[in-house]
Image (cartoon, rainbow, N blue to C red):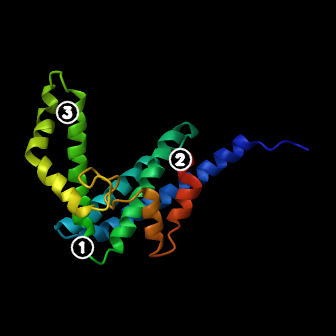
């Protein structure tokens, strides 16, 4: 009995996944993007959705360049990011309170503050390089208001003034489950079955 050539099977499977990426990329670019371009308004809510869509499309375009098996690590990183973007878009789509875009923008400001604080700690006791001066100045300018905003938007945490892991205040697996409650997306199954190996 001949042994199965698993390397050939893996390459064939990878080629199939690659073709699926190209199909989704083309559909998103040719069918979805023109609609969003036509109807997207210039308020923060629409820009948030459109921005997430463009990030996803950018990753699809990147993944459609990664055809060789040696690109598997980059493809896995892109897949993780696409999962997160898809979950965020599902939660945005089903948001009936219209609070989500504002919360995402607040989270982005919070992340900026968190990065600035890490930079400041990194150079504590040393001369701050010129390229980081504005980043650290952001702490003095915006830090207090952002910490207050964190405590208001994500209050049920041990340290409400700290930066939350995600804009929802939950972990990604919890958001996958929350998004699946709106429809049969399969996010939780993908997270539980594949996410660890992608990492």
Instruction: Give the image quarter of residue 189.
Output: bottom right
Q: Residue at x 36, y 75 (%)?
A: 94
According to the picture, the residue beneath numbered tag 2 turns out to be: 198
Q: Can residue 74 be seen in this view?
A: yes
Is disc 3 surrounded by few (<14), some (14 to 19) or many (20+) residues within 10 Å? some
Residue sticking out furthest to the bottom: 96
Q: Mark 1 points at which residue?
A: 39
Residue where numbered disc 3 is placed:
120
Secondary structure of the residue carrying tag 3 is helix
Dot 2: element: helix
Give the alpha-carbon distance from disc 3 to disc 2, as whole Å.
Answer: 32 Å
In the rendered image, which quarter contains the N terminus? top right
Mark 1 or 2, nearer chain start:
1
- Determine crowd level at label 1: few under 14, some 14-19, many 20+ residues with C-alpha closer than 10 A: few
94 up-or-down from 101: above or below: below
Q: Is residue 18 left or right of residue 31?
A: right
In which image quadrant can residue 57 be found? bottom left
Instruction: State which mark lies toward you, 3 or 1.
Output: 3
**Circle 3 or circle 2, nearest the eye:** 3
**Which numbered disc flags the more N-terminal residue, 3 or 2?**
3
Look at the numbered disc 1 and give the secondary structure of its residue.
Answer: helix
Q: Distance between the residues labelled 1 and 2?
A: 35 Å
The residue that appears at 14% across and 36% down in the rendered structure is 136
Lower sequence index among marks 3 and 1: 1
User: Where residue 20 sits: x, y (%)?
Assistant: 53, 58
How packed is label 2: few (under 14 Cα within 10 Å), some, or many (20 or more)? some
């Amino acid at each position: 009995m001949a042994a199965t050539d698993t390397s050939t099977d893996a390459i064939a499977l990878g080629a199939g996944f690659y073709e699926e990426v190209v199909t989704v990329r083309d559909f998103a670019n040719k069918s979805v993007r023109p609609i969003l371009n036509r109807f997207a308004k210039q308020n923060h809510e629409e820009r948030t959705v459109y921005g997430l869509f463009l990030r996803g499309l950018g990753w699809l375009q990147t993944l459609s360049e990664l055809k060789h098996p040696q690109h598997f690590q980059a493809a896995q990183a892109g897949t993780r990011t696409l999962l997160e973007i898809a979950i965020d878009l599902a939660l945005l789509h089903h948001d009936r309170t219209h609070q989500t875009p504002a919360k995402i923008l607040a989270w982005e400001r919070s992340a900026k503050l968190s990065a600035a604080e890490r930079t400041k700690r990194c150079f504590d006791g040393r001369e701050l390089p010129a390229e980081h001066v504005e980043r650290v100045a952001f702490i003095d300018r915006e830090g207090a208001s952002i910490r207050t905003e964190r405590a208001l938007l994500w209050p049920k945490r041990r340290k409400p003034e700290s930066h939350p892991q995600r804009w929802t205040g939950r972990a990604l697996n919890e958001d996958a489950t929350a998004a699946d409650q709106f429809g049969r997306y399969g996010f939780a199954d993908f997270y539980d079955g594949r996410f660890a190996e992608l990492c």
